[in-house]
Each structure stands twice: as C-alpha cells, then as structure tokens.
Image (spheres, grey):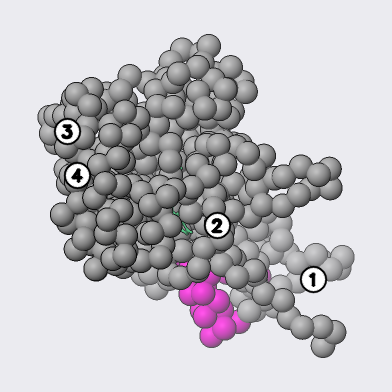
Amino acid sequence: MKGRALRAPKGTRDLLPPATGLWAAVEAEVHRIFALYGYREIRTPILEETELFARGVGEATDIVGKEMYTFTDRGGRSLTLRPESTAAVCRAYVEHGMQTLPQPVRLYYLGPQFRYERPQRGRYRQFHQIGAELLGGRGPASDVEILLLLVAFLRRLGFAELTVLLNTVGDAPSRAAYRAALLAYLEPRAAELGEESRRRLGTNPLRILDSKDPAEQELLAAAPRLADHLTPASREHFAAVRAHLDRLGVAYRVEPRLVRGLDYYTNTVFEVVSGDLGAQNAICGGGAYEGLVEELGGPPTYAVGFAIGADRLLEVLPAGSPLRAPGRHRGPVLLAAAGRLPESGDGVSPLTPIAERLRSEGVPVVETGARAPRLFQLAEQLGAPALAFVGEEELARGELSLRELGSREQTRLPFAEAADRLRRYYEEQP
Ligand code: HAM
C-alpha cells in the first residue's frame, strides 16, 4: 500500500448505482412536470461573490453567520459555495435584464448546495435542491401557482401523506411592529431563554419562535402572535392565498409559528414535512420575497419560490412511487456465448458485432464471458431482464436464444424479433 485510503469529505457522499438511477428518474420528472407549468431551467455558478448571500440571505441568519463555505481565491476575491440558489437566481435576473422579458419569469434549477452543518440523517454539507422561482408575479395568485406546482410534483412522485404547512411572516411594516411586541415580551424574560435565543434577541428575534427547546416553547406559547400584528394588506394577502387554495382543493395546515431561516421572505411562507424524517423533517421550504430583487440592484419585483431537499426527498420516496417501477431501472441484457464459438482470428469476439447491432436497435447490452451459475448472479446484480445466448447454430442462422428472467422461458428467435422483444423491456414505463 502506498498511502492511506482517502474518504469523501465529512458531510458529503458519493452517489453510486443503482441509487443514481433513482436520482436520474427524479430529475427527469422535474424537467417534465416543471415544464408543464411553464418553468424553464436556469443554471447558475456553484460559486458566487460572498456579498450576494450576506445581502440576500441576511447577515443574521445561521446560514450566513456560521454555515457558509467561504474562501479567498487567488485573485483576492471572497467567494462562497452557494448555500442556496434563490439569491443567485435573483442576481441572474437582474444581471441579464430579465425584468424586460414578459413577466412573470418562471425558472427552475437542480443542483448541489453547501452548508457547514452537523451531518446526520437527511442533513449533509453538500446536499441537492430542486427549486423553482417565479419572478415578476402578482401576489397571492403567484403564491398559489408555485404551491400547485410543488404539490403536483410531489403527488406525481407518489407522495400521498405530506403536509403543507402555511404561514405568513407579513410585510416589512408588519414585521417591524411584531418585532417590537415580541421584544417587549421576551426581553424581561431573557433569563429564561437559552444562550442561542438570547443572542437572537439582538439579531433576529423572530427566529426564536423556531426554537425546539421545550422550556422555550412554553414561554413562547404565551408570546404575542405575528397574526395580531399584520397590516391590513398582509392580512388580505394571506386570506386570499388560503381562499385560493381552498377553492382549488389543496390541503394545507396553518402553522402560526413557521418563520423560516432566511431573511428575505415577505408574507406567504410554507414548508412541506414528512413524518418519516424525524427532526430533519422538512423536505421543502419556500415563500414569497418581495424585496430581494431590489436589494440586489433590480426594480421592485414580486417573487415567490421553493426548494426541495432532493437528498431528503429520495430518503422518503414512497415504496410504491412510480419512479421505483422496475421498468425504469432495468440493467442491460447480458449477451453470452453458448458453448465455443469459432474464433475470427483477429481476437475480436463474434459477440461484439451482435452486441453493437442490439444497441443500435435500442437494447442495452453487455457482453459477458461469465458462465452459469455466475451468469445468473450477475444478471440479478445488474437487474438484467434477460440473457441472450449465441451458439454456433444461432451464429449461422442469424438468431438469438433468449432466456427471460421473469418467466424463465427460453426461446430462439430471428435477430430482429429478438431485438423487438428485448427492447420492450425498456419501453414499458408507467
Ligand atoms: P431552505 O429551507 O433553507 O430554503 O432549504 C430548502 C430545503 O433544502 C429544506 O427543506 C431541506 O429539505 C433542504 N436542505 C437544507 N439544508 C440541507 C442540508 N444541510 N442537508 C440536506 N438537505 C437540506 C432555501 O434554501 C430557499 N432558497 C428556498 C426558497 C426558494 N425560497 C424561495 N425560493
């Protein structure tokens, strides 16, 4: 051995087959369903100027305060591996003058995000998000459009038992009024708060509402409520969103304590939770953000979006999800020689041209020298639907012998018929 074996950095993981097949199926579904709602893909850099997140996500948030992967590059610039993509999408919207396009602009993205968090099930330092942002929208109708997309996508993946938690954080004047009321209540009781929450009194008191600490929760139960400090405009906004959702039959639960961990939200916020994930149970978060585009140098722009944690989504993907259907995850057909085949003299196996012909007919194939029983083990490991054998007779007549693993039937067919039959395994999709 030359050196110590290296491992992927803490909190990151290799995604290997066959799991990557499921990731690809989810991604294919993202492209399909999001396009049904008129969303188009955007790809922004994985690196951004640090200032983007400091300004966009908020200096006082956990993300900016303690979770960013920030470094100085060789040119002396402070860059950060993106901890989320909403700020980057808004940066791109402004940079490319997308406000001059017909509004709203509907964008979606897929890709890795980076946060220095303590790794545990469902929480990684490199994780993946599937997100959508609607920019230049019209208030409640846009919030509802985004929620419809989210629910349709999750339904399509086979989720039936998810809960959409809905709340409003109000507009800026609502929050200023509420902040004052909350501080008036909490400051005299600061001694009863934990260290983290005491620190938040000075920076971001609304985040204290998110506390999971039982003692603090008790204290918070009697705290003033944001709902009582909403401006009439914010109250109407929230009522309109709920009325729309009711009318469209989208189930949700109002969660008055839901505040979200990023500073840019205004009015509508939401999360989707799944019971299967324990403490890290939010598979998706989002909301409206009316001030972010302007904060990043653009015009006042109504925007709303969400991001799904893809790692968590896959961890709780229902067993009966159509994306798990075997037809979507078949391995290649195994092509093997039956007995000894005549040598061609140049060292090329007579199986190779046959494999190439099958591939050109759309049948995934690997040639193998394995013999039974190893051959059957291999077929199982790779998820092969069938074995194809070529012996001297098949070679002479242009035929293939197929052994289908489901039915255990063995049939000898002319090449074209055999190819048709094998191709069907890869076409049958739910
Ligand atoms: P977020 O709530 O910070 O929102 O993240 C969205 C989702 O990403 C979470 O619900 C979770 O599923 C997943 N996630 C976050 N951190 C981790 C982690 N360390 N490991 C695994 N999964 C994680 C945002 O990022 C906003 N940009 C969402 C948004 C889009 N709001 C408006 N538009």
Q: Residue 106's image quarter?
A: top left
Q: Is mark 2 on a helix, strand or loop?
A: helix
Q: Earlier in the sequence, mark 2 or mark 3?
A: 2
Mark 1, ligand 1, within 8 Å: the answer is no
- Classed neighbour count for the residue bearing mark 2: other residues with Cα under 10 Å, few (<14), some (14–19), many (≥20): few
Q: Distance between the residues labelled 4 and 3?
A: 19 Å
Q: How far apart are marks 2 and 3 (CA)?
A: 35 Å
Of the pair 237 and 132, the residue shown nearer to us:
237
Of the two numbered discs 2 and 3 in the rendering, the one whose residue sits closer to the viewer: 2
236 left or right, relative to 184: left
In this rendering, does residue 413 appear at all? no
Q: Residue beneath label 4, please?
A: 225
- Amino acid on which disc 2 is placed: Lys
Q: How far apart are marks 2 and 4 (CA)?
A: 28 Å
Q: How far apart are marks 1 and 3 (CA)?
A: 74 Å
- Amino acid on which disc 4 is placed: Arg
In this rendering, does residue 1 appear at all? yes
Q: Where is residue 415 in the image (x, y as percent from the top left)?
A: 56, 54
Q: Which of marks 2 and 4 is nearer the N terminus?
A: 2
Q: Provide the residue span drawn in magenta.
A: 371-392
Of the two numbered discs 1 and 2 in the rendering, the one whose residue sits closer to the viewer: 2
* Residue name at image x 63 percent, y 49 percent: 81
Q: Residue 215's image quarter?
A: bottom left
Of the pair 211 and 109, the residue shown nearer to us:
211
- Classed neighbour count for the residue bearing mark 3: other residues with Cα under 10 Å, few (<14), some (14–19), many (≥20): many
Q: Residue beneath label 2, please?
A: 66
Queried whether the magenta region covers residue 295, the answer comes back as: no
